[in-house]
Image (cartoon, grey):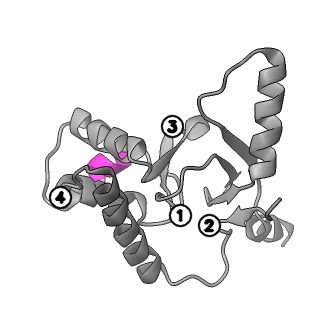
Protein backbone atom coordinates (compact mmCIF):
# COMPACT_ATOMS: atom_id res chain seq x y z
CA UNK A 1 0.00 0.00 0.00
CA UNK A 2 1.45 3.42 -0.93
CA UNK A 3 2.17 5.89 1.88
CA UNK A 4 -0.50 8.53 2.53
CA UNK A 5 -0.10 11.73 0.55
CA UNK A 6 -0.14 14.95 2.54
CA UNK A 7 -1.64 17.65 0.35
CA UNK A 8 -1.55 20.75 2.54
CA UNK A 9 0.62 20.39 5.64
CA UNK A 10 0.27 22.61 8.68
CA UNK A 11 2.45 25.70 8.50
CA UNK A 12 6.08 25.48 7.42
CA UNK A 13 7.67 26.93 4.29
CA UNK A 14 5.09 27.87 1.69
CA UNK A 15 5.12 29.94 -1.49
CA UNK A 16 1.43 30.85 -1.60
CA UNK A 17 1.60 32.70 -4.93
CA UNK A 18 2.98 29.55 -6.55
CA UNK A 19 0.41 27.44 -4.69
CA UNK A 20 -2.46 29.62 -5.97
CA UNK A 21 -1.11 29.69 -9.54
CA UNK A 22 -0.80 25.89 -9.57
CA UNK A 23 -4.28 25.46 -8.11
CA UNK A 24 -5.78 27.64 -10.83
CA UNK A 25 -3.86 25.77 -13.56
CA UNK A 26 -5.07 22.42 -12.19
CA UNK A 27 -8.62 23.78 -12.03
CA UNK A 28 -8.47 24.86 -15.68
CA UNK A 29 -7.16 21.43 -16.70
CA UNK A 30 -9.80 19.60 -14.65
CA UNK A 31 -12.61 21.69 -16.17
CA UNK A 32 -11.25 21.11 -19.66
CA UNK A 33 -11.06 17.36 -19.00
CA UNK A 34 -14.65 17.34 -17.68
CA UNK A 35 -15.99 19.56 -20.46
CA UNK A 36 -17.29 22.22 -18.05
CA UNK A 37 -16.68 25.96 -17.97
CA UNK A 38 -14.77 27.82 -15.30
CA UNK A 39 -16.53 31.19 -15.67
CA UNK A 40 -15.03 34.40 -14.36
CA UNK A 41 -17.25 34.33 -11.24
CA UNK A 42 -16.36 30.67 -10.56
CA UNK A 43 -12.69 31.52 -11.02
CA UNK A 44 -13.00 34.42 -8.56
CA UNK A 45 -14.77 32.24 -5.99
CA UNK A 46 -12.14 29.52 -6.38
CA UNK A 47 -9.37 32.08 -5.95
CA UNK A 48 -11.05 33.34 -2.76
CA UNK A 49 -11.26 29.79 -1.40
CA UNK A 50 -7.54 29.39 -2.14
CA UNK A 51 -6.69 32.79 -0.61
CA UNK A 52 -5.40 30.91 2.42
CA UNK A 53 -5.50 27.35 3.67
CA UNK A 54 -8.25 27.99 6.16
CA UNK A 55 -11.83 26.93 5.54
CA UNK A 56 -13.86 29.63 3.81
CA UNK A 57 -17.58 30.14 4.35
CA UNK A 58 -20.00 31.28 1.65
CA UNK A 59 -20.75 34.54 3.42
CA UNK A 60 -17.02 35.29 3.66
CA UNK A 61 -16.86 34.84 -0.11
CA UNK A 62 -19.81 37.18 -0.60
CA UNK A 63 -18.13 39.83 1.54
CA UNK A 64 -14.85 39.51 -0.39
CA UNK A 65 -16.68 39.69 -3.74
CA UNK A 66 -18.36 42.92 -2.57
CA UNK A 67 -14.93 44.32 -1.69
CA UNK A 68 -13.87 43.56 -5.26
CA UNK A 69 -16.84 45.49 -6.67
CA UNK A 70 -19.23 42.61 -7.37
CA UNK A 71 -22.67 42.47 -5.75
CA UNK A 72 -23.76 38.83 -6.08
CA UNK A 73 -26.79 37.49 -4.23
CA UNK A 74 -26.14 34.63 -1.79
CA UNK A 75 -27.55 31.98 -4.18
CA UNK A 76 -24.94 33.04 -6.75
CA UNK A 77 -22.08 32.25 -4.37
CA UNK A 78 -23.69 28.96 -3.34
CA UNK A 79 -24.19 27.94 -6.98
CA UNK A 80 -20.54 28.75 -7.76
CA UNK A 81 -19.39 26.74 -4.72
CA UNK A 82 -21.63 23.82 -5.67
CA UNK A 83 -20.19 23.85 -9.20
CA UNK A 84 -16.64 23.91 -7.80
CA UNK A 85 -17.47 21.06 -5.42
CA UNK A 86 -19.11 18.93 -8.11
CA UNK A 87 -16.12 19.54 -10.41
CA UNK A 88 -13.81 18.34 -7.62
CA UNK A 89 -12.10 21.73 -7.26
CA UNK A 90 -13.09 22.31 -3.62
CA UNK A 91 -13.99 20.14 -0.65
CA UNK A 92 -16.71 20.96 1.83
CA UNK A 93 -15.69 20.73 5.47
CA UNK A 94 -19.04 19.59 6.84
CA UNK A 95 -18.34 20.28 10.52
CA UNK A 96 -17.50 23.92 9.74
CA UNK A 97 -19.94 24.48 6.85
CA UNK A 98 -16.98 25.82 4.89
CA UNK A 99 -14.83 25.04 1.86
CA UNK A 100 -11.17 24.40 1.13
CA UNK A 101 -9.45 24.09 -2.24
CA UNK A 102 -8.64 20.65 -3.63
CA UNK A 103 -4.99 20.44 -4.59
CA UNK A 104 -5.49 17.30 -6.70
CA UNK A 105 -8.73 17.71 -8.72
CA UNK A 106 -7.60 15.50 -11.61
CA UNK A 107 -7.63 12.41 -9.40
CA UNK A 108 -10.75 11.09 -7.70
CA UNK A 109 -10.06 10.54 -4.05
CA UNK A 110 -11.43 10.35 -0.55
CA UNK A 111 -9.79 12.66 1.91
CA UNK A 112 -9.01 12.92 5.53
CA UNK A 113 -8.94 16.47 6.85
CA UNK A 114 -7.01 17.52 9.94
CA UNK A 115 -8.37 20.81 11.28
CA UNK A 116 -6.76 23.06 13.90
CA UNK A 117 -9.51 24.43 16.11
CA UNK A 118 -7.39 27.47 17.07
CA UNK A 119 -6.02 28.84 13.79
CA UNK A 120 -8.40 27.04 11.36
CA UNK A 121 -5.51 25.62 9.32
CA UNK A 122 -6.51 22.51 7.39
CA UNK A 123 -4.25 19.72 6.20
CA UNK A 124 -5.56 17.22 3.66
CA UNK A 125 -4.29 13.64 3.51
CA UNK A 126 -5.18 10.91 1.02
CA UNK A 127 -4.67 7.65 2.86
CA UNK A 128 -6.15 4.84 0.80
CA UNK A 129 -5.73 2.48 3.75
CA UNK A 130 -8.16 4.56 5.81
CA UNK A 131 -10.61 4.67 2.91
CA UNK A 132 -10.40 0.91 2.35
CA UNK A 133 -10.88 0.22 6.06
CA UNK A 134 -13.95 2.46 6.23
CA UNK A 135 -15.40 0.91 3.07
CA UNK A 136 -14.98 -2.61 4.46
CA UNK A 137 -16.66 -1.63 7.72
CA UNK A 138 -19.52 0.05 5.86
CA UNK A 139 -20.04 -3.05 3.71
CA UNK A 140 -20.09 -5.26 6.82
CA UNK A 141 -22.83 -3.02 8.20
CA UNK A 142 -24.75 -3.18 4.92
CA UNK A 143 -24.01 0.36 3.78
CA UNK A 144 -23.04 1.03 0.18
CA UNK A 145 -20.89 4.13 0.42
CA UNK A 146 -21.16 7.07 -1.95
CA UNK A 147 -18.24 9.13 -0.64
CA UNK A 148 -15.83 9.27 2.28
CA UNK A 149 -14.74 12.37 4.12
CA UNK A 150 -13.06 12.14 7.50
CA UNK A 151 -12.60 15.26 9.62
CA UNK A 152 -10.30 15.23 12.63
CA UNK A 153 -10.18 18.25 14.92
CA UNK A 154 -7.35 19.17 17.24
CA UNK A 155 -4.64 21.75 17.79
CA UNK A 156 -1.67 22.10 15.44
CA UNK A 157 1.87 22.13 16.76
CA UNK A 158 2.31 25.90 16.34
CA UNK A 159 -0.87 26.71 18.28
CA UNK A 160 -0.03 24.07 20.90
CA UNK A 161 3.41 25.58 21.48
CA UNK A 162 1.98 29.10 21.56
CA UNK A 163 -0.39 27.93 24.32
CA UNK A 164 2.58 26.62 26.31
CA UNK A 165 4.39 29.96 26.34
Q: Earlier in the sequence, mark 1 or mark 4?
A: 4
Left or right, residue 43 beside residue 109 = left
Kindly check if marks 2 and 4 are in contact, taking CB atoms under 8 A apart as contact.
no
At 69% from the left and 58% from the top, the residue drawn is 125
Q: Report the disc number at residue 97.
A: 3
- Residue 59 in percent (x, y) is at 35, 42
Identify the element where label 1 is drawn: loop
Label 3 sits on a secondary structure element that is: loop
Q: Earlier in the sequence, mark 1 or mark 3?
A: 1
Q: Which of labels 2 and 1 is toward the front? A: 2
Magenta segment range? 59-63
Instruction: Measure the C-alpha gap from mark 1 to mark 3.
Output: 15 Å
Please name the residue that numbered disc 1 is placed on: 53
Residue lying at 35% horizontally and 71% vertically, measured from the top left: 25
Q: Main secondary structure of the magenta part?
A: helix
Q: CA distance from mark 2 to mark 1?
A: 8 Å
Kindly report the distance in space between the C-alpha atoms of the residues bearing marks 2 and 3. Answer: 19 Å
N-terminal of the two: label 2 or label 4? 2
Q: Is residue 68 above or below residue 62?
A: below
Quadrant assignment for the C terminus: bottom right
Residue beneath label 4, please? 40
Q: CA distance from mark 2 to mark 4?
A: 26 Å
Instruction: Identify which residue is drawn at 80% across, 46% down.
Output: 130
In 3D space, how far apart are the residues under numbered discs 1 and 4 (Cα atoms)?
22 Å
Inter-mark Cα distance, 4 to 3: 24 Å
Q: Nearer the viewer, mark 1 or mark 4?
A: 4
Residue identified by numbered label 2: 8
Amino acid sequence: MPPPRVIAPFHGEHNHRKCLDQAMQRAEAACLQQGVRLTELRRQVLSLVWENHSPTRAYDILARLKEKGRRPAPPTAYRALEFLRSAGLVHRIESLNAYVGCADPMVGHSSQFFICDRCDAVAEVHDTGVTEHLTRNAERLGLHTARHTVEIHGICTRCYHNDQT
